[in-house]
Amino acid sequence: MDWNNALLDSALWLAKAYVITLAMAALAIAGLARYSSWGQQFWRLSAAYFSPRRDWRPLATLAFILFLTLGAVRLQVLFSDWYNTMYTALQKLDGKGFWMAMALFGILATVHVVRSLVDFYVQQALTIRWRVWLNEQLLSRWLDNKSYYRTQYLDTAVDNPDQRIQQDVADFVTGSLTLSIGVINAVVSTFAFTVILWTLSGPLSVAGWEVPRGMVFLVFIYVVIATVMAVRIGRPLIPLNFLNERFNASYRYALVRLREYSESIAFYAGEAVEGALLRSRFAQVIANAWQIVYRSLKFLGFNFIVTQAAVVFPFIIQAPRFFSKQISLGDLMQTAQAFGQLQDNLSFFRNAYDQFATYRATLNRLSGFSRGIDDAAQLHEPDIRNQGDCLALQALTVATPDGRPLVRQLNLEVRPDAPLLIRGPSGAGKTTLLRAIAGLWPYCEGTILRPLGDTLFLSQKPYLPQGSLRGALYYPRPLPNLPHHAAQEAAARDVLAQVQLGHLAERLDDEDDWSRILSLGEQQRLAFGRLLLLKPRAALLDEATSAMDEGLEDAMYRLVHSQLPGTILLSVGHRSTLLRHHANQLLVAGDGTGGWQMLPASAPYPPAASGTWEPLPDT
Ligand SMILES: Nc1ncnc2c1ncn2[C@@H]1O[C@H](COP(=O)(O)OP(=O)(O)OP(=O)(O)O)[C@@H](O)[C@H]1O
């Protein structure tokens, strides 16, 4: 090695290697993206991020990382040559040469440290930015068009979306980068060290045959055999690791459910059943953990033996040539070092085998998630128009997913001065009709006209977001920034008093688990508070007073009538006490025919047998 030209040589080497690697990598990516299923999945998830039309920086960063990776290989080669120089100087008792080697090491080590740190930073920065981008992509697609809700109506629903968004995105980004850099490093390094070993190795006699450069062939044979055997021994670890993830997830899920339903379970004193379930789930985790330990013992044992044998293997092969003075001590040491390096590089494929299997599983989950969002967007959408100032349904047919009609050819119009109450047997489709009006139900035909402006749906169990009571009161409007405006503060307190929750006025800014603290009746009154604050054009109330006594129910409806006289009101409910707050009632037959009747609120219930059910049966 001529160290005087090392800089120029390295620059030339890097330039050549860069051009060749870039061309090969581009070809490999294009080929994989076209011909392999996981390559296509990767392309669909990532092409947009690396498109220079969107932003040139990700691609430039990738190009820089490639340069740093090749720099790492070049440094490995230089270190290998340095070993040769140093040991040769030692063998020749050449003090000057030895000290020069020490100075050289200082330079190489400095470059190595700086390169490693820059590499670490650039890779981490790319990982984080890529993750931010992908997370935002999936999150906004998940929230847009209500995919988070509508995917439940797909034939194959999207399971564990939380895991996919939170964990798989991070694993995908890290896995893509480490695996691709690992492959490039291993391949380029294999070439570089094969060249080194080639120049150092002499002929090898095998059973009377002279094999020129025998060492190079030997290392490849050695590693290929070791890899094949390691894969065979290690393969069962892949499903075992998958099971480990799954068993842990289901144990965690059982624990989360215990927390979520703690009160119901406590009332039932269901500890024995829950305990048995939790213990059996945990037992699965542990049984699998032991399997992993036993299998790993075999796998690690084999790997240790291979690695240890590789330490002395090159010495044994080269020793005769050293003793017969064909090669120097430096050559001998460099052979051992290059052999070890080559062994490491080729072993990358053995070690990355199960990493790659995990990566493919992640890729599958993310692609399935993305496809689910696309499929949800393809689901049938009812024809909803926001126009005018009344709520109207025109020839609306709503069915269950399996095609059973709940209402057929429904025509109605609700105006602010004539509130409507929907009644009918349990399971008749009253809530589903509201879902259709909200645009959540894909199995409907016809036209839905909604007034311009807000439409608010109040359900039987109001949703309370995490955070303060004030946030829950204003939901779904975002809270204005603190400090609160005095007028707004007064409005919030006033509304609380009106819905008979005045005792909570002092706790408006307390952050707590409000859905657990407030009784269902209190939560329903809080929802009426929302209604008074938001003043929507239309309010659809689905058994929104079911947990209140009749006096409170009466008070809440009176409040709505007096405070929101211009709001269109449509309620769903079983109680006859609701009738006095409505002008008309819609009766849903609930007998599988999709029949319905529109009557004044004063008409008796159940309807007289002679009443006419719409639509009239086909004759
Ligand atoms: N996601 C779904 N998948 C399949 N069937 C559903 C789904 N949601 C509702 N259904 C079915 O649609 C029918 C109507 O349900 P809905 O909740 O609208 O009834 P309801 O009239 O509001 O009943 P209740 O008075 O008991 O609240 C029921 O038979 C129900 O099982």
Image (tube, grey):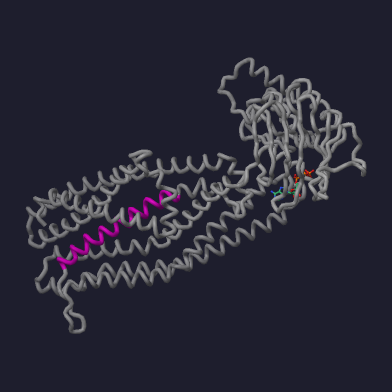
Residue plotted at (33% across, 73% down): 225
In the picture, measured across the screen, residue 242 lies left or right of residue 64, that is right
Counting from the top left corner in percent of width and height, residue 226 is at 34, 71
Q: Is residue 250 above or below residue 377?
A: below
- Image quadrant containing the N terminus: bottom left
Location of residue 228 (image quadrant): bottom left
Q: Which residues are magenta?
A: 171-200
Count of marks overlaid on the render:
0
Residue plotted at (53% across, 50% down): 369
In the picture, measured across the screen, residue 363 lies left or right of residue 407, that is left
Q: Nearer the viewer, residue 604 or 320?
A: 604
In the picture, measured across the screen, residue 464 lies left or right of residue 144, that is right
Q: Is residue 469 visible?
A: no
Q: Residue furthest front?
A: 619
Q: Residue furthest top?
A: 486
Task: Label the magenta part by its dominant secondary structure.
Answer: helix
Q: Is residue 151 above or below residue 603?
A: below
Residue plotted at (37% across, 44% down): 50
Location of residue 304 (image quadrant): bottom left
Residue 192 among those drawn in magenta: yes
Residue 286 among those drawn in magenta: no
Location of residue 216 (image quadrant): bottom left
Counting from the top left corner in percent of width and height, residue 150 is at 62, 45
Counting from the top left corner in percent of width and height, residue 116 is at 28, 47
Counting from the top left corner in percent of width and height, residue 579 is at 86, 32
Q: Is residue 537 visible?
A: yes
Q: Nearer the viewer, residue 68 or 284?
A: 68
